[in-house]
Amino acid sequence: MKLRWICVFCGARAGVSERYTAHVREFAQAIVHQGIGLVYGGASVGLMGTLADAVLAAGGECIGVIPQGLVEQEIADPGLTRQIVTTSLSERKACMTELSDAFVTLPGGAGTLDELSEFWTTAQLGLHRKPIGILNSEGYFDFLLRFFDRAIADGFIDARDRELLSVERTSQALLDALVRQALD
């Protein structure tokens, strides 16, 4: 399967380190360079806004999927290739699943973790076979990955399910891993 659209989950805040912003811009450049479009949460703020702006500035395509409630809070990005407004977060995730060939998690907060957990869980259940990746910028996800290792050791996660996640520290390494996973 060719990766045409990657859904990215990341923060609606920028974080305190400019390095996260730099990594997001680097990831945007990498996907556009490979001819891959972006599907994301549709917001104009935080790392999400930076990501969309960087994809568009590099000549890429960007689809935002945003619940009506966030549109009403005026954080929807009006300059996207396409904006899809949903009635709920559940509908948003279903739409993202349908549009995307792979899923990537960049630094973010509770919403980012919710999305990673849902898409990883649905892969574990066999509801999709799309690649899932984590860009571990600046070691941001090290503690979460240690939690996964503990959950495997304590018998709550099967080691085979952990293998559904490609984890890399650079954008290009992650994209290469996702392409390999898509070809399997």
Image: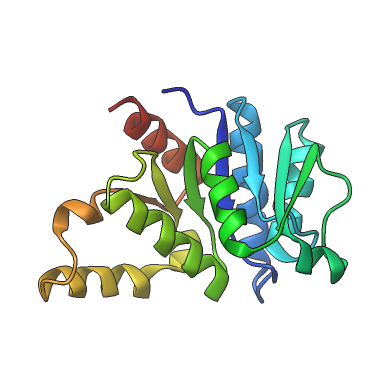
Image quadrant where residue 92 sits: bottom right
Q: Nearer the viewer, residue 151 or 122?
A: 122
138 and 89: which one is in front?
Answer: 89
Q: Name the side, left or right, on which 50 lies relative to 119.
A: right
- Toward which corner of the image does residue 152 lie, by quadrant? bottom left
The residue drawn where x is 50% and y is 60% is: 137
The residue nearer to you, when weighing 124 against 90, is: 90
- Residue 60 in view (yes/no): yes
Q: Residue at x 76, y 59 (%)?
A: 43
Residue 145 versus residue 56 in the image, above or below: below
Horizontal side of 164 relative to 173 (left or right) equals: left
Tell me where residue 89 appears, x and y as whole percent: 61, 63
In the image: residue 35, left or right of residue 78: left
Which quadrant, please, contains the C terminus?
top left
Relative side of 73 to 8, left or right:
right
Q: Residue furthest front?
A: 87
Q: Position of residue 139 (x, y in %)?
A: 43, 66
Q: Looking at the rendering, in which quadrant would you find the N terminus? A: top left
Query: Residue placed at 73% from the left, 32% from the top?
Result: 60
Say if residue 9 shows up in the picture.
no
